[in-house]
Image (cartoon, rainbow, N blue to C red):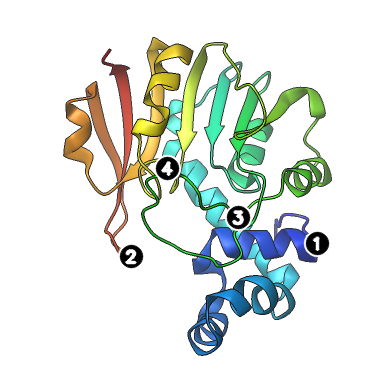
Amino acid sequence: MEVFRVNRNIAHLIVLQRIELAGLFLKKLRKLFGRYIYSNFISKYFININKVGEKYYKLMQNEHRIIQNYLKPGQNILSVGAGVGGLEILILQNNLNTKVSFVEKNYISKKIVYGWDKNNNEAYNSLNLMDKFLFDNNIKKETFQIFDFDEDELPKEKFDVIISLYSLDFHYDFELYRKYFQQVSTQETVIIFDTIRPEYFEKIFKEVKIIQTDKNTVHKSKRIACKYLRS
């Protein structure tokens, strides 16, 4: 069975980023001991590392399946809030001559909070660990770049596809990136993200297509693929 190669620190990040991988036992401990102890201790030392790698791989396979119709070899892809980059590993493995630029935060909030963050202050990532995860899973350095949202100048080239799953407009407002997306998009750029308000984006894009409905999330989100971003 295929799995991602992970160590304890990376598995810890994955569980913080994808709460559904924590399992019922860890979720019960989170309710019992609170978010701070869960974030900094329980979610790191009470996990099965191999199981996390296996479950995360299956989850990313499904994410890849949902968006694969928008992917092809040779694309330039921007990924915002990708976590440790499991989906992008599968994209790079399955599409030759593709390049990915990651835009990420580089800190872990002391107390994990899942919900709407209008100011984009919440973060659960380490760019060093992300880089290691990509390397450990045989992704060549020349196929990706990682940009610190708070410290680096963001890439200015045009992108064929922009991806932000369960991040952009799911945890923080799309408007934080709207002007930037206008700068790095062409009329053919496809922007894929999850939202609880798909009808709102019919005013922002000329084309909005719902490609997945997630009834298991608290907010019953929809994944949309959008084109023709309005000025």
Which mark, by number, is residue 124? Answer: 3
Report the residue marked by disc 2: 216
Report the residue marked by disc 4: 66
Packing grade of label 3 (10 A; few <14, some 14-19, many >=20) is many
Secondary structure, mark 1, is: loop
Which mark, by number, is residue 7? Answer: 1
Q: Earlier in the sequence, mark 4 or mark 2?
A: 4
The residues tagged by marks 2 and 1 sit, at their Cα atoms, a distance apart of: 28 Å
| Residue 157 place in picture, x, y as percent | 57, 11
Q: Is residue 181 visible?
A: yes
Q: Nearer the viewer, residue 151 or 69?
A: 151
Task: Identify the residue at image location x=61%, y=43%.
Answer: 105
| Residue 169 place in picture, x, y as percent | 35, 42
Secondary structure, mark 2, is: loop
The residues tagged by marks 4 and 2 sit, at their Cα atoms, a distance apart of: 16 Å
Secondary structure, mark 4, is: helix
Along the horizontal axis of the image, is 13 left or right of 31?
right
Task: Identify the residue at image location x=71%, y=49%.
Answer: 126
Q: Earlier in the sequence, mark 1 or mark 4?
A: 1
User: Could you tell me the amino acid type at mark 3?
Assistant: Tyr
Task: Identify the residue at image location x=49%, y=50%.
Answer: 62
